[in-house]
Image: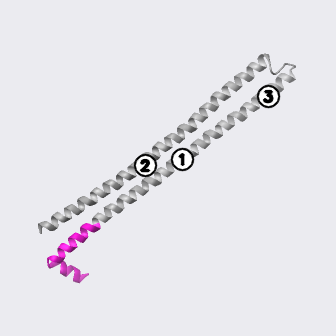
């Protein structure tokens, strides 16, 4: 190391050291850009996973809506039959129809929410991936600028 430092004082070696330093700096900028892109890719994967998880939760809510509908219809039929009323006509049928309509409305909302969660996650993931590509591109141009500056400095010696 001492010999290298002594050679650098000599002149020609200092040019070599300056170019080596420039190259190392440029490589560091490229590596930092790749690392940032990898970080954004990981965030994109996390966003997609979160969206799928939310969609599954909404689908479970939809299944719960259908289960509740079945329980309500069974209760309507049991109560009307116990009271000596035909469960397929009159107020029993009206109550059952209302329960079905509400269940369909709620089920459609949960399905829409699941689609929205997946769509939002995909959009967020695409934004992260774009940011990663931009980080790599910026790192490339920063490295190119570093090399250009290094060449200019060597040329001015």
Label 2 neighbour load within 10 Å: few <14, some 14-19, many 20+: many
**Direction from residue 144 to residue 107 in the image, left or right:** right
Q: Main secondary structure of the magenta part?
A: helix
**Left or right of 140: which side holds 65?**
right
- Label 3's element? helix
| Residue 127 belongs to the span the image colors magenta | no
Residue at left offset 72%, top offset 33%: 68
* Marks 1 and 2 in Cβ contact (< 8 Å): no
Closest to the observer, 78 or 155:
155
Q: Residue 98's x, y, as percent?
A: 70, 22
Earlier-in-chain disc, 2 versus 3:
3
Q: Residues within 10 Å of mark 3 (few under 14, many from 20)?
A: few
Q: Label 1 neighbourhood size at 10 Å, few (<14), some (14-19), many (20+)?
A: some
Percent across and percent down for residue 42 are 47, 54
Q: CA distance from mark 1 to mark 2?
A: 14 Å
Q: Nearer the viewer, mark 2 or mark 3?
A: 2
Q: Is residue 122 above or below residue 36?
A: above
Q: Secondary structure at mark 2?
A: helix
Give the magenta range.
1-24
User: In the image, what residue occupies the spot 38% across and 59% down?
Assistant: 34
CA gap between label 2 and label 3 equals 50 Å
Residue 128's label in the rendered image is 2
Q: Residue at x 57, y 43 (%)?
A: 54
The disc at residue 72 is: none
């Amino acid at each position: 190391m001492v010999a290298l430092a002594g050679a650098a004082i000599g002149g020609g070696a200092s040019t070599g050291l300056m170019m080596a330093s420039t190259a190392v700096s440029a490589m560091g900028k490229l590596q930092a850009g790749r690392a940032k892109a990898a970080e954004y890719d990981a965030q994109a994967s996390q966003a997609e996973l979160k969206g799928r998880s939310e969609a599954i939760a909404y689908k479970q809510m939809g299944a719960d809506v259908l289960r509740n509908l079945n329980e309500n219809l069974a209760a309507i039929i049991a109560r009307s039959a116990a009271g000596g009323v035909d469960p397929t006509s009159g107020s029993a049928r009206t109550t059952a129809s209302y329960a079905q309509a509400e269940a369909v409305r709620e089920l459609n909302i949960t399905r829409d929410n699941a689609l929205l969660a997946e769509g939002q996650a995909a959009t967020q993931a695409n934004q992260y991936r774009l940011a990663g590509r931009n980080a790599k591109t910026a790192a490339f141009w920063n490295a190119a600028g570093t090399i250009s500056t290094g060449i200019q400095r060597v040329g001015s010696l």
